[in-house]
Amino acid sequence: MDILIVEDEFLAVQKLMKLLSLSEYSADVIGVTDGIESTVEWLQTHPQPDLILMDIELADGQSFEIFNLVTITCPVIFTTSYDESAIKSFRGNSLHYLLKPIKKDELEQALHKFQQASVVRHVTAIDIGLLIDDLKKQNWQETVRSQFLVNHDQQMIPIDTADIAYFYTRGNATYLCGKNKTSYLIEYGLNDLENLLDPAFFFRLNDEFLVQPMAVSRIHHSLNGRLKIDLNPEIEHEVLVNRDRASEFTEWLSR
């Protein structure tokens, strides 16, 4: 079974590839893309795979847009952090999904289903349109997280969101920085986290930082209307808020 992975988070890709390598089915990852543009380009220049594992939240938008730009004739399994009301929409529209964080047995069941099916209906732009309409009617939102599980020294540690100072990215990896000044590698990307966290308590500064208000220790005016932010705990990286977000950020901080 040839599989294309559409996922913009390095850790999530690595986990999927590991789970697939442990599968009892012959699952070969023949490609990995991380956004709408790169996925469309891949599909236009390669034969269709047997299956696509596709994250919904990508760096350049929601993967639903891909179906408006290219015809996909193979089955698709969406990977998502959506809440139960949204999952009902997936079921109601006969779309397949796996909830993040993805578990080995659930992935195995999904592969078994597609391996056994003699005919599997592929997802069309019409299917996606109906799904989006259904989601809008339900005023869907992703589940607000109050806690995250992180791996540290071969242990899994629960961390309450109240104990998190900020999230940040380095390359393709995302980290959680606790108020205890310790950073932990996590599976979620900033796009996922922005939807999973209460916007009253976390603000997306830029492509690299998502912070809570108590982590902001000082604000400096910078060039071109930008703001330079000092964070606590400190980080050896310049943190800037662009001019178009500066006003929204200061209003959020003043609430």
Image (tube, rainbow, N blue to C red):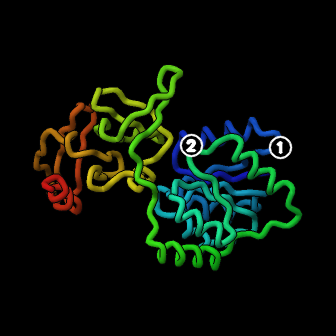
Q: Quarter of the image containing the C terminus? A: bottom left
Question: To which quarter of the image does residue 53 belong?
Answer: bottom right
- Secondary structure beneath dot 2 equals helix
Relative horizontal placement of residue 118, taking residue 103 as reference (left or right): right
Q: Residues within 10 Å of mark 2 (few under 14, many from 20)?
A: many
Q: Residue at x 48, y 77 (%)?
A: 137
Residue 138 in the image: above or below residue 84 = below
Q: In this orientation, does residue 205 appear?
A: no
Identify which residue, 215 or 51, lies in the foreground. 215
Q: Residue at x 45, y 55 (%)?
A: 143
Residue sitting at the far right: 118
Residue tagged by mark 1? 26
Q: Residues within 10 Å of mark 1 (few under 14, many from 20)?
A: few
Q: Look at label 2 and name its amino acid.
A: Ala
- Secondary structure beneath dot 1 equals loop
Q: Residue at x 80, y 55 (%)?
A: 113
Residue 238 in the image: above or below residue 45 = above
Q: Look at label 1 and name its amino acid.
A: Ser
Q: Earlier in the sequence, mark 2 or mark 1?
A: 2
Q: Residue at x 24, y 40 (%)?
A: 238
Q: Position of residue 102 (x, y in %)?
A: 61, 45
Q: Position of residue 244 (x, y in %)?
A: 22, 63
Residue tagged by mark 2? 12
